Amino acid sequence: MDSNGDLAGTVFEQLEQLIATGQIRPGEKINENQLAQKLKISRGPVREAIRRLEQYGLVEVIPHKGAVLRKLGFKEILDLYDVRAGLAYAAGALLPTRATSADIAELKHLLEDMENAAIREDSERFSAINEVFHRRLFAIAGNEPLMHLAEQQEILLKAFLQNEIRNPRMLRLSNAQHQSIIEAIVYNDQEGCAKAFYKHIAIGKQKLVDHKYYLE
């Protein structure tokens, strides 16, 4: 990849973070000039990063207005969860046959880190490790198209959901679900792992229905 491509990737990550943290909100224009000036780069990498966002379904280009962060309705968010759950089931079925002892050790380490964050009631730390844990599950499954689709859904969900209000009990319950996934991997239980990972995402969807922590 050339330097412009590398730079576009960096800009993409920065834009993703701005969107995920609510600094760019649904319906708001992404101004190429202002962003390029802020980052002290040319408009080319910024334009390429915005094109990537469009491919991910995060932005739409409106005539005479430019790139705008999309607005998603509540049903569309729930539909994304359904897709995410389906991908989790597929990954779960692969994990017991693909995970190495080193992979399992890594997952257990992440599980322990999340448990410590839950004990400290550090929801921000828990969420950060949780994101790594989920990405590692899809990576360990060893299916590139599946991993790409999961990443796309994750970016979309992060962009349109507010930070979930968590309490220590919710964190521990979430981690218990993570434990079930790891146990199924250890015991080479493909069906059990698929169901455990699916259930974990489905519970996340239900929490969204109950609390509606999404961006309108």
Image (cartoon, rainbow, N blue to C red):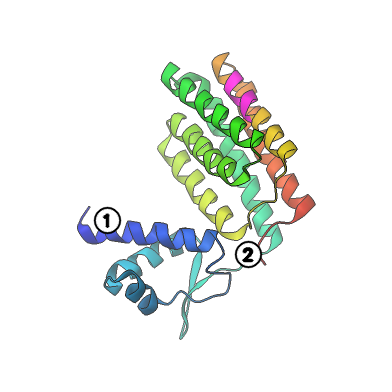
Residue closer to the observer: 93 or 102? 102
Residue closer to the observer: 114 or 78? 114
Q: Is residue 172 above or below residue 44?
A: above
Extreme residue in the bottom direction: 64
- Quarter of the C terminus within the rendering: bottom right
Residue at left 53%, top 39%? 129
| Image x and y of residue 98, in percent | 45, 22
How far apart marks 1 and 2 lie (CA) works out to 29 Å
Question: In the image, which residues are magenta?
Answer: 178-183
Per the image, the residue denoted by label 2 is 72
Element assignment for label 1: helix
Per the image, the residue denoted by label 1 is 6
Extreme residue in the front direction: 120
Element assignment for label 2: loop
Residue at left 21%, top 58%? 3
Extreme residue in the left direction: 2
Sequence-wise, the earlier of marks 1 and 2 is 1
| Image x and y of residue 154, in percent | 53, 49
